[in-house]
Image: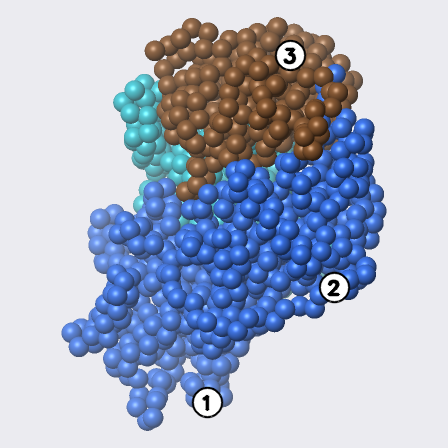
């Protein structure tokens, strides 16, 4: 048993035994902790994993609560019928919000949620149907098999079963194909897109999920409190939910529980003591919470639980055995006669600076083409045009005869283009094998719900087995469960190649794969690329090391000042006067 | 609605719009230079209004205690950072705010002219800007804008609580700077409205001239355009951040004094005002000053007319406005 | 242990990004009036080293500037004041501001310390780069690649640095322009500015440098007088010659 599992077990045990030792008041306080923890769990996904943030979760709790209360009071619906309604209502609101926000940078979402939280608070207090400031009362308690949830115990048990269930389910989610994509959103969204992740959809999904969790809390809250008024759904409460997540540790699911516990349990204490201390009544606990959050980010920005974990020396990665699995389906090989990748007349200008002018080249299956040229010649721009990172001003981009001009990066990946990046783009705190498995994103199809319920195990085994197979090919399988950020730069480059291969590409674009490698490593890499060529892959690489390129490439294309100045076999190119002038960097 | 009501609402909307315009400019400036979404901007408004009224009424304003607390806090942090070798510079930096706090405490007893009280108020609040930057943001200046935003929200809560402690829960309303009313095309126009609009114009014009012509103004723009380039010229992130906060505090202080003559201000009134400044600022993507200004007047007018047609939903309507604005921006980005 | 004439004395410098060391145990010295170059392939850690020496990235190890005691975590601003300048690979110009404003801001630190009259300094820069004088009222964003590099150099020189760190000045420049830039770098020596030059174009860099270091995978693998390095078998093989790939002698490009 690992210490982490022991700790988890103890936490579950504590939750289970609490009702035996605690009284009514403490149990209902812990029920509030559980409710806050559910909202905070959503925020861990949103803030800690996806790098988005919402101050408006309390408003979503409110939507869930009011929808349930109104449905029960007006239409007499049973709470078990209003639950799906509450979830649907919050989900729809979040969906509309996500539609607007996904294309903008993260701080717009945060600001919008502040505005949304404020607007909804005034709306709850102003509408007739919500009962205005005095709210709605007279709600029935939850009933299960004729047993009413009037005392603290059943409510406590229900809420904490949900909390533990959610931690299990969200843990499953993060440990899946979709989860890896979510974990890439915060720092490496552009990379994830090149792996075929639909960034907008992934962001929306996380936002909607976190809001639905808030809606669930609202639903329960209505029948737990048995009355609903606007004050628990204010912006201040929304801010408090976010503080719980960041205090506990926005990167850990249990951090949500720790943060919710701290804030919820400390709040009544502070509310009792602080007004005495300040000599007047007021919400001075918010000064304390605000102050603690400010201090937190100055000294321990990851939050309390991750801090504790690293102090105890626990790794953030849990290595586990990979189940044997059948190999994944491979895509059809491109037709042998035409070029696998063909670009004609690519043009791109940034402001006044022309980066690419009429750049054209073709790569056949089973061929290695090297794109060389001095720094700043426009090679990386060309890569970005081919992979859909930037839109070309003009030019035809064909993949096995079909145009990919204007396709998103995700779509181009789907059609069989894999790539590595000039500046290594791995998710540093994720294991090597999971990084590689991200490359196989498009080779799985299971969705969020399936992943949460762990019904995706066969697919997962297949993806991880494929990732391990690629790691074995590049000789890094021994490091599969190391943190990717702890590898040497050269190894990280190789991991990028393995990740691209995990997507079963037909065209492989490598941006300076040999940079930072030692001589011997380069030779091994060259051997490996020859092997891939023999398997029928079309490889286009940008490289600076002439030895490496000339010994490896079938054809070489030379760029300078955004133009192709020469193309041909290595020997032809080497004897080209213009190339010698440009590339040897002669300074007379 | 008749023309008279419309003219009245327009007048009201323009006056509020001018305040939002000033706030939006401060928010865009702070964001451009520091990437901080400066939620506590609104607190400068309430602090200034409460300070100004306290001075007018002959009390020592709470700002004095607050400022001294901030000086002590910043000094403590500086000593932690620099060791006791930094003592001299800490004392030197503290002289101006401490002296000013003393001056304010003394001058309150003499019932000085409004203009003097106004200047003291602006100076007191202005001192807080750089101090707050030093205490809260200097150490995390390189953090992601998400972290900065969360800290800014936490900072807002702290400022709100401190505002309650130092100023108390009572609302204040200052006598208008000029209490008169003129008739324009048959519609009575409050002199305060004209004062607000003129002050806004003068401030905006002044800021424009400073940023285009003065060396420090250029340095600030440089820091906003390219922070790394600016640092390599010796324009430190710290200097740029403190200057941006200084300007934001001055703008907040003037807005607070202006608005205290038009409406009652409590310790927590600033937040909603500042938030409306943000709604305007987002119109320009937190980057364009002219668009933010136009947006501000739009927000002011919308709010004014909404309060006539659906007074209960005034705030909801104004803040829901952010959705179409963001929709428009995201479509503009997609193109 | 201060040595006169030693502008930069870096010992066992290591720079990390997270857990990985991009630069490891690197030592280098620059004397007054020298042009020192670091050559090596992309990704070797050259830019990282320059950024760390300029205070933009934290480093481990000892670095003494201008003959003083080793400084612990100096700020960029303190180093600018002490006489260090860096022209980064990306130039980092103030693109929406005019050429003249860019240059003026180059003298920001001196201006702040009391040198309010920039006319002489500006005239000197315009004499060095007449193209900038022609375009002084244009926004920097409208300049060509070569003009941008000139502006970056001019802006850095406005601060009157004693040691200038140059990161890939030839990046994306046409041969003729590049030749001009290298000539200017050579002329800096005469103006009392020492240079640490990071270049991909090893041939050009070694030609104007006094001393050179070869960097590979975060470490210095070779060092010596530039003229010797230029003829070193290993350097030629790895960085200088396309033509050496098939083991024919280097083409007739003068070293």
Secondary element under disc 2, as helix, strand or loop, is loop
Tell me the shade of chain C.
Answer: brown
Picture coordinates of residue A346 (x, y %)? Answer: 80, 47
Give the residue at the far left of this rendering: A21
Residue C167 vertical position relative to residue A94 in the rendered view, above or below: above
Subunit that carries the residue with mark 2: A
> Looking at this rendering, what residue extends furthest in the bottom direction?
A146
Q: Do labels 3 and 2 share a chain?
A: no
Specify whether A485 is left or right of A26: right
Residue C51 location (% of width, % of height): 51, 29
Q: Which residue position is annotated with label 2?
A: A334
Q: Which of marks 3 and 1 is in front?
A: 3
Colour-to-chain, cyan: B
Picture quadrant of residue B25: top right
- Distance from disc 3 to disc 1, alpha carbons, whole Å, reads 88 Å
In contact (CB < 8 Å): disc 3 and disc 2 = no
CA gap between label 3 and label 2 equals: 54 Å
Q: How far apart are the alpha carbons under marks 2 and 1?
A: 62 Å
**Residue found 48% across the figure and 33% down from its top:** C218
- Which residue is painted at 22% across and 54% down in the image? A273
Whether labels 3 and 1 share one chain: no
Q: Which mark is residue A76?
A: 1
Q: The N terminus of chain A is located in which quarter?
A: bottom left
Of the residues under marks 2 and 1, which one precedes in the sequence? 1
Question: Looking at this view, is C196 or A229 the one in front?
Answer: C196
Residue behind mark 3 = C186
Residue sitting farthest toward the front? C247
In percent of width and height, residue A530 lies at 64, 51
């Amino acid at each position: 048993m690992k210490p982490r599992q022991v700790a988890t077990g103890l936490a579950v045990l504590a939750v289970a035994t609490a009702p035996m030792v605690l009284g009514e008041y403490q149990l209902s306080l812990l029920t509030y902790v559980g409710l806050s923890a559910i909202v905070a769990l959503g925020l861990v996904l949103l803030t800690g994993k996806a790098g988005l943030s919402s101050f408006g979760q309390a408003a979503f709790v409110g939507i869930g609560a009011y929808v349930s209360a109104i449905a029960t009071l007006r239409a007499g619906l049973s709470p078990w019928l209003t639950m799906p309604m509450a979830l649907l209502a919050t989900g729809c609101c979040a969906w509309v919000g996500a539609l607007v926000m996904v294309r903008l940078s993260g701080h717009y979402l945060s600001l919008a949620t502040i505005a949304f939280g404020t607007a909804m608070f005034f709306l709850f207090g102003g509408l007739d149907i919500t009962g205005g400031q005095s709210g709605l009362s007279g709600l029935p308690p939850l009933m299960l098999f004729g047993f009413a949830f009037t005392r603290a115990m059943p409510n406590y048990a229900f809420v904490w079963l949900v909390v533990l269930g959610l931690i299990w389910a969200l843990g499953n989610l993060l440990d899946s194909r979709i989860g890896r994509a979510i974990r890439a959103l915060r720092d490496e969204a552009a990379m994830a897109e090149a792996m075929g992740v639909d960034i907008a959809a992934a962001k929306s999904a996380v936002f909607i999920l976190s809001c639905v969790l808030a809606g669930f809390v609202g639903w329960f809250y209505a029948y737990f409190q048995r009355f609903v008024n606007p004050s628990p759904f204010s912006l201040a409460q929304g801010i408090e939910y976010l503080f719980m997540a960041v205090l506990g540790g926005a990167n850990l699911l249990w951090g949500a529980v720790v943060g919710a516990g701290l804030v919820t349990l400390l709040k009544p204490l502070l509310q009792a003591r602080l007004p005495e201390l300040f000599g007047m009544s007021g919400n001075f606990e918010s000064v304390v919470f605000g102050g603690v959050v400010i201090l937190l980010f100055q000294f321990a920005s990851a939050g309390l639980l991750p801090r504790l974990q690293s102090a105890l020396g626990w790794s953030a990665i849990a290595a586990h055995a990979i189940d044997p699995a059948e190999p994944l389906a491979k895509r059809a090989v491109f037709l042998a006669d035409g070029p696998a990748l063909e670009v004609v007349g690519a043009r791109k200008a940034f402001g006044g600076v022309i980066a690419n002018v009429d750049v054209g080249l073709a790569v056949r299956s089973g061929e290695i083409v090297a794109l060389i040229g001095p720094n700043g010649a426009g090679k990386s721009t060309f890569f970005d045009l081919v992979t859909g990172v930037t839109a070309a001003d003009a030019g035809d981009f064909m993949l096995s005869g079909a145009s990919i001009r204007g396709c998103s990066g995700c779509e181009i990946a789907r059609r069989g283009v894999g790539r590595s990046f000039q500046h290594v783009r791995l998710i540093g705190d994720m294991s090597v094998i999971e990084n590689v498995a991200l490359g196989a994103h498009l080779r799985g199809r299971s969705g969020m719900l399936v992943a949460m319920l762990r019904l995706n195990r066969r697919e997962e085994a297949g993806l991880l087995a494929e990732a391990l197979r690629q790691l074995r090919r590049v000789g890094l399988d021994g490091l599969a469960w190391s943190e990717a950020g702890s590898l040497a730069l050269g190894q990280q480059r190789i991991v990028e190649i393995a990740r691209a291969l995990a997507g079963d590409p037909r065209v492989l674009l490598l941006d300076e794969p040999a940079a930072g490698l030692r001589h011997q490593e380069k030779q091994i890499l060259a051997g490996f690329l020859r092997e891939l060529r023999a398997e029928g892959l079309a490889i286009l690489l940008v490289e600076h090391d002439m030895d490496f390129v000339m010994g490896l490439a079938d054809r070489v294309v030379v760029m300078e000042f955004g133009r192709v100045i020469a193309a041909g076999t290595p020997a032809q190119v080497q004897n080209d006067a213009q190339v010698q002038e440009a590339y040897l960097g002669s300074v007379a | 609605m008749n023309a008279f009501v419309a003219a009245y609402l327009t007048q009201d909307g323009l006056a509020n719009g001018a305040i939002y315009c000033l706030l939006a400019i401060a928010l865009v400036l702070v964001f451009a230079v520091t990437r901080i979404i400066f939620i506590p901007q609104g607190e400068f408004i309430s602090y200034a209004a409460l300070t100004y009224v306290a001075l007018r009424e002959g009390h020592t304003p709470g700002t004095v205690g607050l400022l001294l607390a901030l000086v002590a806090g910043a000094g403590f942090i500086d000593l932690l950072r620099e060791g006791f070798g930094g003592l001299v510079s800490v004392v030197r930096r503290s002289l101006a705010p401490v002296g000013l706090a003393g001056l304010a405490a003394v001058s309150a007893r003499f019932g000085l002219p409004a203009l003097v009280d106004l200047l003291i108020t602006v100076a007191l609040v202005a001192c807080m800007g750089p101090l707050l930057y030093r205490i809260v943001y200097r150490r995390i200046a390189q953090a992601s804008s998400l972290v900065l935003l969360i800290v800014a929200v936490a900072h807002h809560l702290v400022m709100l609580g401190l505002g309650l402690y130092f100023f108390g829960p009572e609302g204040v309303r200052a006598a208008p700077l000029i209490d008169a009313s003129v008739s324009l095309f048959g519609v009575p126009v409050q002199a305060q409205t004209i004062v607000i609009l003129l002050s806004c114009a003068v401030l905006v014009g002044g800021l424009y001239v400073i940023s285009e012509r003065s060396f420090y103004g250029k340095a600030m723009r440089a820091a906003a355009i390219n922070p790394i380039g600016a640092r390599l010229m010796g324009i430190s992130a710290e200097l740029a951040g403190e200057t941006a906060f200084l300007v934001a505090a001055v703008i907040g202080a003037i807005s607070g004094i202006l608005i205290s003559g038009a409406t009652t201000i409590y310790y927590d009134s600033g937040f909603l005002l500042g938030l409306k400044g943000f709604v305007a600022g987002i119109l320009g993507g937190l980057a364009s000053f002219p668009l933010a200004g136009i947006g501000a007047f739009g927000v002011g007018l919308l709010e004014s007319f909404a309060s006539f047609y659906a007074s209960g939903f005034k705030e909801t309507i104004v803040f829901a406005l952010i959705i179409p604005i963001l929709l428009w921006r995201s479509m503009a980005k997609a193109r | 242990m201060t040595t006169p004439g030693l502008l930069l004395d870096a010992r066992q410098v290591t720079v990390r990004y997270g857990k990985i060391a991009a630069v490891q145990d690197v030592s280098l010295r620059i004397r007054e009036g020298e042009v020192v170059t670091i050559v090596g392939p992309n990704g070797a850690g050259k830019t990282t080293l320059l950024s760390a020496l300029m205070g933009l990235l934290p480093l481990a190890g000892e670095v003494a500037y201008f003959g003083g005691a080793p400084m612990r975590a100096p700020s960029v601003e303190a180093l600018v004041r002490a006489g260090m300048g860096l022209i980064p690979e990306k130039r980092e110009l103030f693109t929406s501001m005019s050429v003249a404003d860019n240059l003026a801001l180059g003298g920001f630190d001196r201006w702040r310390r009391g040198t309010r009259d920039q006319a002489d300094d500006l005239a000197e820069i315009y004499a060095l780069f007449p193209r900038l004088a022609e375009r002084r009222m244009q926004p920097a964003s409208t300049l060509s690649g070569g003009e941008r590099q000139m502006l970056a150099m001019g802006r850095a020189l406005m601060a009157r640095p004693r040691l200038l760190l140059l990161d890939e000045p030839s990046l994306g420049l046409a041969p003729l322009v590049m030749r001009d830039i290298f000539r200017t770098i050579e002329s800096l020596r005469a103006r009392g500015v020492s240079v640490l030059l990071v270049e991909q174009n090893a041939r050009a860099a070694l030609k104007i440098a006094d001393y050179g270091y070869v960097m590979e995978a975060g470490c210095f693998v070779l060092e010596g007088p530039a003229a010797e390095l230029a003829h070193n078998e290993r350097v030629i093989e790895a960085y200088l010659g396309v033509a050496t790939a098939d083991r024919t002698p280097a083409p007739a490009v003068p070293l």
